[in-house]
Structures are given as structure tokens and as C-alpha cells.
Image: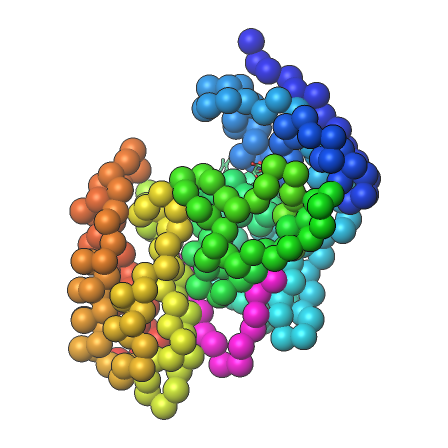
Amino acid sequence: MPHEPPVESPRSLDDAYRLLEGGNDWRPIAGGTDVMVQITGELGEPPERLLDVWHLDELRGISVQDGRLVLGALTTYTEIRRSAECQEFLPALCEAAATIGAAQIQNRGTIGGNIVNASPAGDTLPVLLAADAEFALGGPRGERTVAARDFWVAYRRTARADDELLLRVVVPLPAERRMRFRKVGTRRAQAISKVVMSLAYRPDAGVWRDVRVALGSIADRPVRLRETESVLEGAAARETTADHAAAVLGREIQPIDDVRSTADYRRVVSARILHRLLREEGGW
Ligand SMILES: Cc1cc2nc3c(=O)[nH]c(=O)nc-3n(C[C@H](O)[C@H](O)[C@H](O)COP(=O)(O)OP(=O)(O)OC[C@H]3O[C@@H](n4cnc5c(N)ncnc54)[C@H](O)[C@@H]3O)c2cc1C
């Protein structure tokens, strides 16, 4: 039998916090594009009761404040794609949003849902990791901020407590940072990633600086590749550096084998993506 859990739809954050304060195993639901797939119980435990956050205006909006891009947790992929702020300051996120599902999912799916769902294949997650994003969480016990690098703690597990909502995503916008995004799936739309990568760096007189390489779909959670980054950091932007970095990446990652791809494929493709992004950025 399909499970039909009770739903509460608070109209303000205060009302949502009052519900969360009472315990009861609330499962937030935003766009529902992940939760509704889980509701039949065929994919693990279905939710006991749902806290519908869709009407919480406090979780909406995109703005640039003090050199940071701020996105409400309920920002949909369509809103990201259409946002002048995102296009100007974080185009890699627009590119990621454009690869997610198809129009129906992009109209309803939210960045907050992608983050909290914590799938290792979540397409925005490597972008947020590479961009040093921070997540504002709030609940009856107050607000706090968690860095993206500390948020995904294990397979589909996050640093969010049961009584917390994700409120906002805050992305610092350092001058001259460049970012790239690349996703490889079985086809161009409605494809879950086999490999998804984001690269961030600052060009500095022919040298890579502040390098971040983040990968999804290869481990139990999205990961930063610290060894590969250290090869690139301060190195000359030329082909031999890219060759070296791609080789180190191939040794650094321990990809998974699963229904979507093999470990070998993921290793080879991840190294090639990095090499290609570096080549395109280096212009050789
Ligand atoms: C056909 C299809 C195609 C898809 N394609 C892709 C794809 O290409 N790439 C990709 O990355 N994903 C894809 N997805 C997955 C999904 O669309 C995304 O993960 C989406 O961002 C989820 O957002 P949502 O608002 O629908 O989340 P929901 O389903 O509402 O929630 C997801 C999880 O986040 C929690 N949650 C949501 N909002 C909050 C909040 N504010 N505070 C606390 N917890 C919260 C929920 O409790 C739940 O655990 C696809 C899904 C479908 C059905």
C-alpha cells in the first residue's frame, strides 16, 4: 500500500520552528522531487510525517550582499538559470542547474533539496564545494553556519540536525576567481552523473592559484581532491602541469563501481575532464 504521511504546511519560519520543537520526526519537503520518489517505501524507510517548507518566503530569493552570493534554500534550478546574479557571479552553478533532470524537475527541484538529499551524484554539490560555499541552518535552537566541506559527512548523511532547516546558501565571490563545471552522464538530459566535476582557481601571471577541484559521483559523498589541488597550486599553467595533475588525480581517487558506471571508467574520465578543463583555461 502507498504510504500517505500527514503533512503540515507552515506559513512562517517561526511556525515551522514551533513544529520542529515538538520533535515527531518531521521530514522537510521542498520541491518533493527526491522525497516523492522515496514515499512508496520501495527505496528505504518512507517519511513518517512531512513538513512542507514550500510556503516559507524566508527561504526564497537570490541576492549579492557584501561580496557574497546568497541563495534561499528554496531557489529552484529554473530560478538559478534565469538569475542575472547567478549568470554574472557564478555561471558554473547555472551550467550545473541546466544539466539537472529536465524542465519539470528544474521548475520544482531546489538547491536546498539537492544539498540536504546528499546524493553523491547531486550536481550542484561539487560547484558548492569548489566555491567554498557555506550553508545557514536554522531551528528552534537558533541559527548556525556550516561550511560545505564539513556538511556531507557520510553516504547520504549531513551535518544537519533533525530539528534544523537549511535556510540559505552563501557563496563568497573573490575577485578574479574562475570556475568551470563538467558533467558526464549517459545522455544530455534526465541523466544522473557518472562523473561530475567543478574546478575553481584564480589566474595569476600564468600560474594557477587558489585551486579547488571537487568531484561527485565517485565516492560516498562529493569530495575535494587535495593532492591534485596541491600539484596545481602555484604551478605554471602549461600542458606538462595538466599532465601531472591528471595523473595524480587518477591515483588519488578510489572510484566506486555501481549501476551507472565502473570504477575504471570513472578514473579515466575524471582525469580527462580535469585535463581538458585545464587545457581550455590555459588556452594551449
Ligand atoms: C526525474 C528526476 C531527475 C533528476 N535529475 C537530477 C539530476 O540530473 N541531477 C541532480 O543532482 N538531481 C537530480 N534529481 C534529484 C532532485 O531533483 C534534486 O536533488 C533536487 O534538487 C531536490 O530538490 P527538492 O526541492 O525537490 O527536494 P525534496 O525532494 O523536497 O527534498 C530532498 C531532501 O532534502 C530535504 N530538504 C529539502 N529542503 C530542505 C530544507 N530547506 N531544509 C532541510 N531539509 C530540506 C528533504 O527532507 C529531503 O531529505 C532528479 C530527480 C528526478 C525525480
The spot of residue 144 in percent (x, y) is 64, 55
Above/below status of 129 relative to 140: below
- Give the residue at x 40% y 40%: 155
Left or right of 198? Residue 89 is right
Residue 73 at least partly seen: no
Report the image quarter containing ligand 1: top right
Q: Is residue 19 magenta-colored?
A: no
Q: Nearer the viewer, residue 120 or 226?
A: 226
The quarter of the image holding the C terminus is bottom left
Q: How many marks?
A: 0
Q: Is residue 175 magenta-colored?
A: yes
Above/below status of 165 relative to 170: above
The boundaries of the magenta stretch are 170-182
The quarter of the image holding the N terminus is top right
The spot of residue 113 in percent (x, y) is 57, 43
Type of secondary structure dominating the magenta stretch: strand
Q: Nearer the viewer, residue 108 or 32?
A: 32
- Give the residue at x 22% y 44%: 263
Left or right of 183? Residue 125 is right
Left or right of 168? Residue 119 is left
The spot of residue 26 in percent (x, y) is 66, 30
Above/below status of 264 relative to 19: below
Residue 30 at least partly seen: yes
- Give the residue at x 56% y 56%: 146
